[in-house]
Image (tube, rainbow, N blue to C red):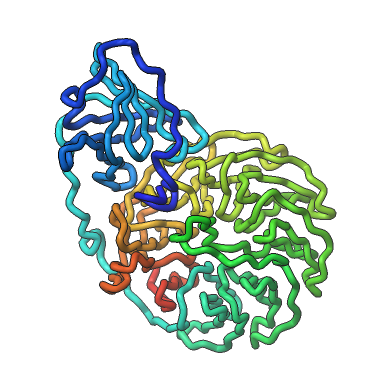
Amino acid sequence: MKKFVSHSFACLLVAALAAPAIAQTPVRFSDLSGWWAADPEFGGESSHLALHFIEKDGKPEGRLWLMAIGAYDIPLGELTVYGNSINFKESFPLTWNPTTQTLSGVIPADAAPVYNIPIEFRRSGPVEKPAPRDWVKAAPWPRVLWTVETGAPVWAGLERDPASGLLLVANEAGDLNAIDRDGKVRWKFATEQPIRAQPKVLGKVVYVASDSGFLYALDLKTGKEKWRAKVDTVTAPRLPPNDPKTRWDRHASSVMSDGRLLYMASRDKNLYALDIKTGREAWHVTADDIMTATPALHGGSVIFADYAGKVRAVSARDGKQQWIYDAKLTVPGDIVVAEDRVIIGSRSYDLIALDAATGKELWKRYYWFSWIESPPVVRDGVIYTGSSDATNVYAVNLADGTFRWKTAIPGYSWQRTVVTDDLVITGSLGKGAYPASRNGAFFALDRATGAFCWMFLEPPSEETVKAGKNWGFAASPVLGEGVVYAADFNGRVYAIEAR
């Protein structure tokens, strides 16, 4: 919720429809005072909620507890009663049934988008807010081999060229840094605008898109510009989270290539196909909304998705549409194809698998109260993703979408994981002045069980917390030979022993 719990809970408890009132004795506050609990079910999973009716300054009001995202005692405002129907200032209408002693309704659409999920509260005992987890003791610290400063926060995923050993790190200052195996910056290229897209190495060229509106092709060895192509004709500014019109467009599309053309989705609503040698446009296709997800290639198709929730497959040769699927809400993270299945995460709280040839939906997996921003990673028939407000990392079976495990982590995990033979490695972003605890960290989980193996916990400054700023790790890490590389919101790059 934007007002109480931001990000995937945008505007919780707004514009829900009340259930019809039951023609019985009107409800009194004495019938409601105290604690209530509900365990709504959807998609084969349930979530525990609590509702607390209290008196404040002589007026009845309600407080909501959302265990799935660790948000407790959220004020709903003053209680109003209309016969057997009740509501709060922050609209959450419910119907009192004196026979069953229950409060029933539907989870508001902005709290559970797309689906009308029934909810029924019953009397319960008091709920206590759990003590904050001591993440420092969650796992041993890893061995940090070296660090290097880039001078500005890093959002864009990291890229590494195995042949040269160069690590490519782009930051908010608009600089692309090429760092060698020893942590020395070999060259730097300035775009003068923030870079949110992961650099991509193809052969001896590195391609990187910037908020300058250009895609740059640079010589990998020297950083010298070979060409640039305009790939955003709008270059609209990214609005900060505290702006009521924010789109939460944190990342940007990288490029994919079939060896002949480069394919890139843009915030100007276009999918561009560019000549890989010159950057000259071959064709473009216009979507319904802005795009931040890197497209995927499958056979002769390019598959891409927009903020309207539309997933499309078009011909890689000429952009002619082959199929379209409606995910209902924004698909912000990169598209992945594995075993002829398209895997996407949506702000409808769904992880979705589609048939790559037809776009037919094969299955969905619901993440309670959480956007799925993290690009999926598939290995040996298992999908690994992070989440947003749910603050979990998940292992999901590719075949049918069933959970293998999920692990609670310190903060938001919006980035792509690194998956090794034994580990799932990723980071989390912290947030100050937030109703639920969010911490920045970098950590490794056991691939088979989800248990913590090691963790690097990054403490924020007091000023960062008070200002409600982010800290920690937002950029997708990358793996080298026994080393995992990560970059944080301070602009610092880490080489960490991956074991």
* Residue at 60%, 71% in the rendered image: 199
Question: Foreground: 441 or 252?
Answer: 252
Is residue 2 rendered to the left or right of residue 28? right
Give percent across and percent down for residue 337. Answer: 62, 49
Is residue 426 rendered to the left or right of residue 216? left
> Looking at the picture, does residue 496 appear above or below residue 224?
above
* Residue at 77%, 54% in the rendered image: 285
> Looking at the picture, does residue 16 appear above or below residue 96?
below
Give percent across and percent down for residue 73. Answer: 24, 44
Is residue 236 rendered to the left or right of residue 473? right
* Residue at 41%, 78% in the rendered image: 492
* Residue at 37%, 45% in the rendered image: 406
Rendering quarter of residue 123: top left
Give percent across and percent down for residue 10. Answer: 44, 48
Question: Foreground: 208 or 85?
Answer: 85
Hey, which residue is sitting farthest front in the picture? 58
Is residue 115 rendered to the left or right of residue 327? left
Question: Foreground: 369 or 141?
Answer: 369
Question: Foreground: 368 or 18?
Answer: 18
Give percent across and percent down for residue 151. Answer: 46, 83
Residue 477 seen in the figure: yes
Residue 453 seen in the figure: no
Of the 4 image quadrants, the one containing the C terminus is bottom left
> Looking at the picture, does residue 464 appear above or below residue 2?
below
